[in-house]
Image (cartoon, rainbow, N blue to C red):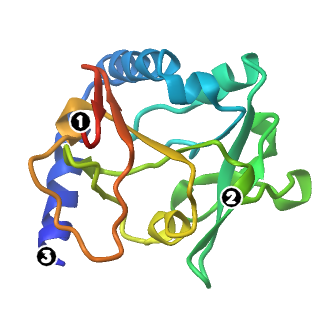
Amino acid sequence: MDGKKNLRKSIKAKLSELSLPQYEDQSYKVAQQLFQNDEWMEASTVAITVSKAPEVDTFQIIRKGWEQGKRVVVPKCEPKTRRLDFRELKKFSELESVFYGLLEPIVSKTNTVSAGEIDLVVVPGLAFDKNGYRLGFGGGYYDRFLANYHGKTISLAFKDQIVSDIPIESHDIPVGKIITSEGVIVIGD
């Protein structure tokens, strides 16, 4: 566990060095790479988190999804069970600030979407290796969700988030692709 804790700390420190203009430029490049990707273009329903810096900015991605007529679903965390419930987001005013300043869907204003209806999950993380393994934020929410999800998965990352080795455990599930500002890492290639 110390390996994961130290890696989280190291990556957060690197990302905190990005200036706002660098952060916006890098996020834009990642988004442009995503929009040209087959998984994005073919997906009707996309699951994505509402980002919080220093994660790649997903607000522009959510907007683009709406512009392209995609159904955008965002996670609602259930802290007691550590499970994710994805809910359709039609406008940003359907979000509320919850624990740790995360923005999540307001239950009374959004509808649940089942895992089977989701074509593509954009899986968040702090660090990634070239085998598709990710270091999350420590809650295990996505590990639990991905164990029963059989659709396509992609992660978005700045180049400083790509590391040579992630400490993995038996329940860890790799993503199919990692989109960076430099290009796309296809897992299993």
Task: Work out whether residue 119 or residue 183 is closer to the camera in this orientation and state it.
Answer: 119
Q: Which residue is mark 1?
A: 189
- Specify whether 97 is left or right of 56: right
Up/down of 159 relative to 163, above or below: above
Q: Are marks 1 and 3 in contact (CB under 8 Å)?
A: no
The image position of residue 170, as x and y in percent, is: 29, 77
How many other residues sit within 10 Å of disc 1, few (<14), some (14-19) or many (≥20)?
Answer: few
Up/down of 113 relative to 152, above or below: below
Q: Which residue is mark 3?
A: 2
The image position of residue 33, as x and y in percent, is: 41, 18
Disc 1 versus disc 2: distance between alpha carbons?
Answer: 27 Å
Label 3 sits on what residue type?
Asp
Q: Determine the secondary structure under disc 3.
A: helix
Q: Tell me the quarter of the picture where residue 167 sits.
A: bottom left
Task: Work out whether residue 95 or residue 75 is closer to the camera in this orientation and state it.
Answer: 75
Tell me, for residue 115, which label it has, or none: 2
Label 2 sits on what residue type?
Ala
Q: Determine the secondary structure under disc 1.
A: loop
Label 1 sits on what residue type?
Asp
The first of marks 2 and 3 along the sequence is 3
